Each structure stands twice: as structure tokens, then as C-alpha cells.
Image (tube, rainbow, N blue to C red):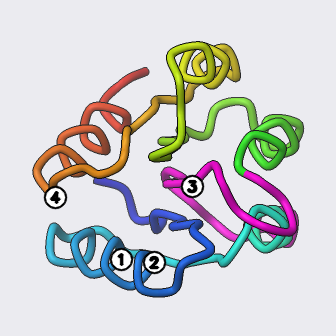
């Protein structure tokens, strides 16, 4: 585990709160953003993040666009993209964005935590 928080990005406030609670119960610190633009603004201001948990379908700036912009700031930050509206071609597209895993919604807390731990453990 790292000292930097997990940045939870989802346009649904209840989802952000539930994800943050699950992560905090596991010992992660969290910070949240309601869309890709808010996440990008946080990171550009020097906000720390050990990993970004990012919904792909959001208003203002969607997850795929946010990932492309985040990669311009930091190629190494690990991202777990999540969505319930993805086909296999989109999952493949997300994987090409570098250092990004995909988590299909709905998912269990156990699957979420396993995916985050796997992502953090990767070099």
C-alpha cells in the first residue's frame, strides 16, 4: 500500500461514496472527483494518487478522454477503468491506453479489491 490516496472518479455520488467506503475499510486513503475534468484538474494541481479508479461513462469529460489526458501528465499512474456498458472491442481499446485495467460493472467488493491490489503490485 502507498501513502497516496486512490482517486475515485464517478459521476454518481452514491457510487463514489460506496467505492470510497470499501477502499477505506481496506486501508486505502481516497479522494474523489465527479468526472474526468475534475480528476484532471486535481492531478494537474499536483494532487497525489497511487491509483485512479475511473468510470468510463460520465458527463463533462468521459473516462477514455480523461485517461488520454492523464497519460500526458503521468504515464506510470495505474488506472482501473470501470463500466457496465462496454463491449469486448472497448475493453481492448482501454487496454491500449497503457497501465490500465478494466473492471466490468457490476462487480463485487472482493473483485474490486483484488483488481486494485493486482494493479498496485504490477511494476
* Residue 93, position as x, y percentages in the image: 67, 17
The mark closer to the camera, 1 or 3, is 3
Question: Would you place residue 99 above or below residue 81 in this image?
Answer: above
Q: Which of marks 4 and 2 is nearer the N terminus?
A: 2
Q: Distance between the residues labelled 3 and 4?
A: 16 Å
For disc 4, the marked residue is: 109
* CA separation in Å, label 1 and label 4: 11 Å
Q: Is residue 21 left or right of residue 58?
A: left
Mark 1 and mark 2 in contact? Answer it, CB < 8 Å. yes
The reply to whether the magenta stretch includes residue 87 is no
Q: Which residue is drawn at 35% across and 77% down?
A: 20
| Above or below, comparing residue 75 to residue 80 in the picture | above
What residue is shown with label 1? 20
Q: Are marks 1 and 3 in contact (CB under 8 Å)?
A: no
Predominant SS along the magenta part = loop
Dot 3 or dot 4: first in sequence order is: 3
Q: Residue 16 carries which label?
A: 2
Give the quadrant of residue 15: bottom left
Q: Which mark is residue 78?
A: none
Q: How crowded is mark 1: few (under 14 residues within 10 Å), some or many (20 or more)?
A: many
Q: In the image, residue 63 lies at what x, y percent?
A: 70, 49
Looking at the image, tell me whether mark 1 or mark 3 is earlier in sequence order: 1
Q: Which element type, helix, strand or loop, lies under badge 3?
A: strand
Residue closest to the eye, 8 or 106: 106
> Residue tagged by mark 3?
55
Instruction: Tell me the residue at 62%/74% (across/down).
Output: 11
Start-end of magenta stretch = 43-62
**Image height check: is 11 above or below 4?**
below
Q: Please name which of the two marks, 1 or 4, marks the residue nearer to the observer.
A: 4
Q: What element carries label 1?
A: helix
Amino acid at each position: 500500500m502507498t501513502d497516496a490516496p486512490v482517486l475515485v472518479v464517478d459521476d454518481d455520488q452514491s457510487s463514489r461514496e460506496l467505492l470510497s467506503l470499501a477502499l477505506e475499510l481496506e486501508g486505502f486513503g481516497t479522494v474523489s472527483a465527479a468526472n474526468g475534468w475534475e480528476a484532471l484538474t486535481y492531478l494537474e494541481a499536483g494532487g497525489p494518487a497511487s491509483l485512479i479508479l475511473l468510470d468510463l461513462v460520465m458527463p463533462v469529460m468521459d473516462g477514455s478522454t480523461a485517461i488520454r489526458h492523464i497519460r500526458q501528465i503521468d504515464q506510470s499512474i495505474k488506472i482501473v477503468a470501470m463500466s457496465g456498458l462496454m463491449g469486448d472491442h472497448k475493453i481492448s481499446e482501454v487496454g491500449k491506453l497503457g497501465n490500465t485495467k478494466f473492471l466490468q460493472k457490476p462487480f463485487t467488493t472482493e473483485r474490486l479489491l483484488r483488481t486494485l491490489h493486482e494493479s498496485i503490485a504490477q511494476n
